[in-house]
């Protein structure tokens, strides 16, 4: 049986909260808000706080600020800890006014696996005026991956298009079983 994978993203709906970029103990935004989706372990000093930029219904899975850091309730984190302990890192965060515990979910692996023939990909060109980006992905729509390149990894980012957070079908089913809010799954 072939393993199936899904892109996990926030199911944005009216009336739900919008989280800002994490801040350190001095209230300063973290230097690199994109580090949490880089597909590698991160090192954080001190306790982070995630501000609520727009009040609304709390979600079990959200993406925070410009960096789109995945912020998850501990019940969601426990699914990842049980099913993919080698693929994730958890960074405890405080969310202002929330008694529940949340963590930033970091996928610690990045895999070169985008199936460019099956996906709708666009590349940066010399005409775009950014020579350092020429040949890299500009956009990846209708993302598909080559599962043969994934191995036993269950949670990862896609090399070259790190905005995509990919999870295996067993994680998808477990999150559906616990009725996690804020999750949207797109087959890849």
Image (tube, rainbow, N blue to C red):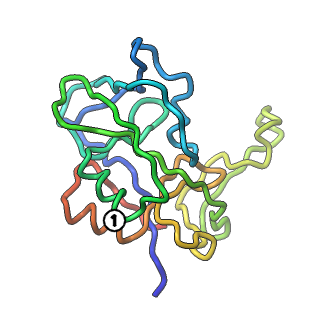
Residue at coordinates 53% horizontally, 34% vertically from top-left? 43
User: Does 169 sit left or right of 132 as displayed?
Assistant: left
**Disc 1 designates what residue?**
172
Q: Position of residue 114 (x, y in %)?
A: 63, 63
Depth check: give the residue in front, 58 or 11: 58
Query: Eyeballing the image, is 98 above or below 23?
Result: below
Give the image location of residue 183, x and y in percent. 30, 53
The image shows residue 26 at horizontal and vertical percentages of 41, 11
Residue at 49% from the left image edge and 57% from the top image edge: 87
Choose between 16 and 99: the one closer to the eye. Answer: 99
Q: Quadrant of residue 72?
A: top left
Q: State the quadrant of the N terminus.
A: bottom left
Q: Residues within 10 Å of mark 1 (few under 14, many from 20)?
A: many
**Residue drawn 39% across the image and 34% down it:** 64
Residue 148 occupies quadrant: bottom right
Single out the residue that lies furthest toward the front.
Answer: 46
Q: Residue furthest top?
A: 26
183 sits to left or right of 155: left
Residue 8 x %, y %:
40, 55
Q: In this orientation, which residue lies closer to the viewer: 71 or 135?
A: 71
Please, is residue 118 above or below residue 68 in the view?
Answer: below
Disc tally is: 1
- 46 left or right, relative to 143: left
Left or right: 139 as drawn, with respect to 156: right
Q: Secondary structure at mark 1?
A: helix
Residue plotted at (34% across, 27% down): 50
């Amino acid at each position: 049986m072939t393993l199936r994978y899904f892109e996990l993203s926030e199911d944005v709906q009216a009336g739900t909260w919008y989280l800002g970029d994490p801040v350190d103990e001095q209230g300063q935004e973290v230097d690199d808000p994109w580090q949490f989706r880089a597909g590698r372990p991160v090192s954080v000093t001190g306790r982070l706080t995630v501000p609520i930029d727009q009040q609304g219904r709390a979600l079990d899975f959200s993406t925070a600020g410009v960096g789109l850091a995945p912020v998850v309730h501990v019940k969601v984190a426990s699914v990842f800890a049980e099913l993919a302990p080698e693929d994730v890192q958890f960074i405890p965060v405080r969310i202002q006014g929330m008694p529940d515990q949340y963590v930033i979910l970091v996928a610690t692996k990045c895999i070169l696996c985008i199936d460019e023939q099956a996906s709708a990909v666009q590349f940066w060109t010399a005409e775009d005026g950014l020579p350092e980006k020429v040949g890299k992905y500009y956009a990846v729509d209708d993302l598909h991956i080559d599962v043969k390149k994934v191995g036993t990894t269950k949670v990862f980012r896609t090399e070259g298009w790190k905005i995509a957070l990919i999870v295996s079908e067993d994680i998808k089913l477990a999150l559906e079983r616990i009725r996690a809010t804020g999750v949207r799954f797109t087959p890849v």
